[in-house]
Amino acid sequence: MRWSRSCIPTLKENPHEAEIPSHRLMVRAGLIRRLASGVYTFLPLGLKTIVRIESIVREEMDAAGCQEVLMPILHPIEIYEESGRIENFGSELFKLTDNRERTFALGPTHEEVITMIARDELRSYRSLPQCLYQILIKFRDEIRPRYGVIRAKEFIMKDAYSFHTDDESLDEVYRVMERAYRNIIERCGLEYRVVEAESGYIGGNESHEFMVLAGNGEDRILSCDCGYAVNLERAAARPVEPYVGEEPCEEQYREVETPGMTSIDEVSTFLKVRPGDLVKTLLYRTGDRNIAVLVPGDREVNDIKLVKIFDDPDIRFLEPGEIEELTGGPVGFSGPVGLPVETAIYADMLLKDGRMMIIGANRADRHLTGVLEGRDFKIDQFGELVRAREGDACPRCGKPMSMSNGIEVGHIFKLGTRYSSRMKATFLDENGESHPFVMGCYGFGISRLIAAAIEQHHDENGIIWHPSIAPLDIHILPVNVSDDEVMRTAERFETGLQEKGIEVLLDDRDLRPGVKFKDADLLGIPLRLTIGKKLKEGRVELFERSTGEIEELPVDTALERILERVGN
RNA sequence: CGGGGCGUAGCGCAGCCCGGUUAGCGCGCCUGCUUUGGGAGCAGGAGGCCGCGGGUUCAAAUCCCGCCGCCCCGACCA
């Protein structure tokens, strides 16, 4: 393509709307433009990258034995009533009505639609397993769109759904899909982790996320050298060194004065103990019950786990007034000793070590030391309540895990029969008995992958594309387009390369060289052929964006060399 | 939805507190000349519902009220 007649609107300055590098660069390099918050146009170069990623995805899906289909975007709302997911989506589901006042949703994902297809068309065990996939735009009314195309209200996604007679078959395909996803991300040249994940509102039993590592990623993951990785929100807290406190003694606990000290730091410093020697007592309200949650002083509660345990998304902290009413003491001095019997006491597993506790005395400016569970109060239930952190032990090998940030580009789920049984999608087995399909589903964010790739591979000058997903293969840069010899040479290369199926951008704009070089760095096409003053000596330059290496080539043999370099 | 910030030419911004000529600057765009290996120079030019609506005032980009949009943090989240 010729730059002078292409829509590649590069920007010299950072757009006001963008904060993180990938978003800034996608706008500056002319890949995208915003229409509304979380709604973007993909301009020619942006679309070229999408097409390349899509073709990698198609190759891997086809190789994994999946078949491509195309499902509707417009979904009659009743199908979500049937699956019972309308509440799960809540306001995230885009709804609209047709001219007969029938309500439709814009497809946020397609479990319902595909399950209906399977119900009607895959009725025999003989035709199973099958896996169907599609690539299309999904709609989700995100509460807060963010970071350009990373969290958008509409985005391009590949989604696949598999149908099985039993769990073994699902496990097998699940592994094949995991391998396919690894292949896709590796072919895109990205560093990533596969992490154990929560299933969210998709539901199901087991799920894994594919995280492209990037400092600005929205997700936090703990990973270990042994290959294990887990989403922080799901990770269990396991200290590498078990807790060692003082030996429990037979005496009663003691009340100590801690004037004005409401924080763990203040109390531990004052009493000359480690923060982990204290026990934090957090008071919550769920439904009409008060709950006390006990965790080690140096740990934070994992809200997501609380919501799960109490099955209450609205669980909340008690207000200061409620705390005083319940405990008799002010905020900052709460403890489990002397709470009303109807207040259930939950404690994290980490407190199961029979330690002597230091806790609030439910009285202003007082704490209790030497408190023992069982003797002084009773814990009703232990559970995994705290957030894991960097340095916690790997559940597989026991070594400390490290924390990194990631962008979720893929998520695969073992759904089991969650959809098929609710939607009565069954097949007949060899005995003529009907069973609900065992299902898996597999999502991959194509538009998000672009941002993730840029987030991971850029420098202060612009994007650095991996060749497999770059919008074009080579950028021909004639330094002076009014020099006939230079332009003729550039055009000769353009034709020669295009004949070999290489995609070329020829910067034929009559601009100062500096402008063209800056723009070339910004676009980040893997190879750049500069044709300039050295042409008089019969040489051209081949520049590699990722390494900055320059190879000087004789004009006559350059084409061959370039084909070698691009060569697959 | 809570907190914060912003909205003036295609892009990035100043002006607003303290109301008063014809609303400015840089980049980009158009014309001409010069220039051509890392964001050129000179000369000329086009381009504005100052987010929208209302109010105060002789007079509003500027003050007041309401609304809308955008971004960031949080809550939320394939």
Image: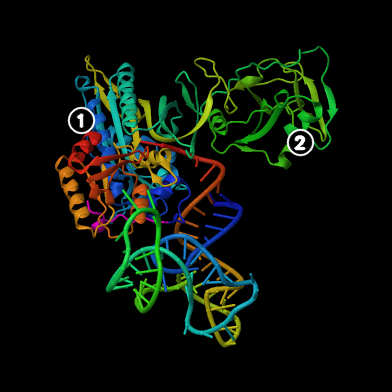
Residue under the point 16% across and 48% down: A492
Q: Main secondary structure of the magenta part?
A: loop
Q: Using the numbered discs, state the Cα–Cα distance from disc 1 to disc 2 in whole angstroms.
A: 64 Å
Q: Quadrant of the C terminus of chain A?
A: top left
Q: Nearer the viewer, residue A69 or A204?
A: A69
Amino acid at pointer 1: Glu
Name the secondary structure under disc 2: loop
| Residue A220 point in image, percent of width and height | 51, 33
Q: Nearer the viewer, residue A30 or A338?
A: A30
| Within-10-Å neighbours for mark 1: few <14, some 14–19, many 20+ | few
Looking at the image, is A220 positioned above or below residue A45?
above
Amino acid at pointer 2: Thr
Residue that mark 2 sits on: A262
* Quadrant of the rendered image containing residue A434: top left
| Residue A66 point in image, percent of width and height | 24, 28
Residue that mark 1 sits on: A121
Q: Nearer the viewer, residue A539 or A159?
A: A539
| Residue B52 point in image, percent of width and height | 45, 71
Asked if residue A217 is among those painted magenta in the image, a careful observer would answer no
Colour basis:
rainbow
Q: Chain of mark 2?
A: A
Q: Which residues are magenta?
A: A1-12
Residue under the point 54% across and 17% down: A399
Q: Chain of mark 1?
A: A
| Within-10-Å neighbours for mark 2: few <14, some 14–19, many 20+ | some
Residue A159 visible (yes or no): yes
Q: Nearer the viewer, residue A91 or A233?
A: A233
N-terminal of the pair, mark 1 or mark 2, is 1
Name the secondary structure under disc 1: helix
Asked if residue A9 is among those painted magenta in the image, a careful observer would answer yes
Q: Are marks 1 and 2 on the same chain?
A: yes
Q: Which mark is residue A244?
A: none
